Amino acid sequence: MGTKLERIMEISATTPKPEFTSLYHLINIEMLKQCHKELDGSKAVGIDKVTKAEYEEHLEENLTNLVSKLKNKAYKPLPSLRVFIPKANGKKRPLGIASYEDKIVQLAVKKILEAIYEPRFLNCMYGVRPNRGCHDAIKEVHRQISNEHINHVVDADIKGFFDHLSHEWMMEFLKLYIKDPNLLWLINKYLKAGVMTDGVFEESEEGSAQGNIISPILANIYMHNVLTLWYKFVIRSNTVGNSFLAVYADDFIAGFQYKEDAERYYVLLKERLKKFNLELEESKSRMIEFGRYAEANSKRKYGKKPETFDFLGFTFYCGKGKKSGNFCVKLKTNRKKFQQKLKAVKEWLYEHQTMPVKELIMKLNTKLVGHYRYYGVSHNIAKIGAFLHFVQRYLFKVLNRRSHRQSYTWDGYIDMLKVYPLAKPKIYVKLF
């Protein structure tokens, strides 16, 4: 199966406008068995409540029936179970949880779509792609502003991106390369499967449930056609100075050397998104002066520091190198993300306060290292140090709530940390 997908990827990479007419047959028992093997059995279950372990009890029979349903076009995906998780701004993000069998088929479709589109996605796209991630996008934004004479940044936010993807446009984008009507039928089935919220079924007239396996690749295909190709062939070709675009799923940052180019892009961006059933979140979208001249200009014009922008959990701000004193792009943990992560650790500590000290600190260190691995980026040592400081104080309070007999004085607590030390902050990602 891997060889066939590799062949598709090769054709997609070497053909100006490939047309794939026979793809549906690749979703056979061999591929579905491999997808089942790769799926995480600890994930939440969908509306049918079937787990990986339960499905595996009659795996051969289940997959044989599944292949038969797919072949006869009798397969119908179940609605996704909608759950809500809290966001940093106090609102809740809707997530869709597919049934286990649907997850298997979705993963198979995802593999085929990735083979077709990975060679065609532009380098400015970083979200949910093999061998790419958040830190790569962050590094690129940092490099562009630091080295490519970028003076203006368009910080844009799409309102409810996953909820408002146009199914009609999505299918039109897929039809550009996929000429297999059976695979298109299956993808459309997923788009129209609907969601179940508190036992109530809701039809899906637009959008792709965030949390489903297939949603990230569909989102990338949508952004590829709506944003990145448009930037490459329309915006950049009509831009006087330097510019860049960095995209991670529905988050993106655009930078320009000249204000006129940035203003034009911002105006045209609104029109472009509207054409494809999307719109900017006006309260979170803006164009700012940002770069080596921003501090001096902001101080001269407004008597204050230059504006900052947020991207992937970090706040980018204009700074100066410690040794040279020259302009330097710096990063720190976004304030809302900092508070959100700290709150999560605090709640976890209070939930596990009865755990033996050695085990509690061992598990806490796993969380701390995870935090450092993401937020441990050049210039951000102070913020991850502050994170440890607050966690250390929360731990002290938690240990002293267990009982009077086990209470620690501060000096005693410090001595205990010498025996069971907390993980120290470390920079894992260097930007230069």
Image: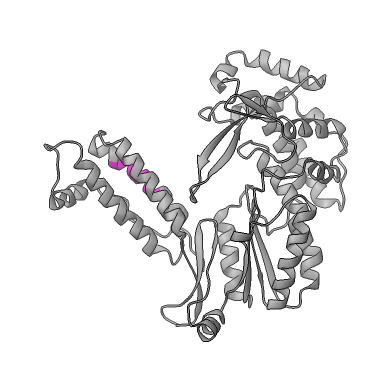
Q: In the rendered image, is residue 159 in sight?
A: yes
Provide residue 339's location: percent of width, then percent of height: 40, 53
Instruction: Examine the rendered structure and indicate whether residue 160 appears above or below residue 293.
Output: above
Provide residue 397's location: percent of width, then percent of height: 23, 46
Magenta stretch bounds: 361-369
At 83% from the left and 51% from the top, the residue drawn is 14
Q: Judge from the rendering whether residue 379 lies leftward or rightward of residue 398; answer left or right.
A: right
**Which sits in the foreground, 197 or 241?**
197
User: Which residue is most to the left?
Assistant: 405
Q: Magenta stretch containing residue 301, yes or no?
A: no
Q: Judge from the rendering whether residue 122 lies leftward or rightward of residue 72; answer left or right.
A: left
Query: Residue 262 falls in which quadrant of the image?
Result: bottom right
At 53% from the left and 29% from the top, the residue drawn is 44
Colour logic:
one colour
Query: Residue 245 falls in which quadrant of the image?
Result: bottom right
Instruction: Examine the rendered structure and indicate whether residue 416 appears above or below residue 25.
Output: below
**Which sits in the foreground, 114 or 185?**
185
| Main secondary structure found in the magenta portion | helix
Q: Magenta stretch containing residue 364, yes or no?
A: yes
Instruction: Examine the rendered structure and indicate whether residue 289 appears above or below residue 408.
Output: below
Provide residue 209's location: percent of width, then percent of height: 65, 37
At 70% from the left and 46% from the top, the residue drawn is 219
Provide residue 199's location: percent of width, then percent of height: 59, 24
Q: Judge from the rendering whether residue 126 lies leftward or rightward of residue 408; answer left or right.
A: right
**Which sits in the foreground, 193 or 105?**
193
At 70% from the left and 37% from the top, the residue drawn is 110
Query: Residue 105 falls in which quadrant of the image?
Result: top right
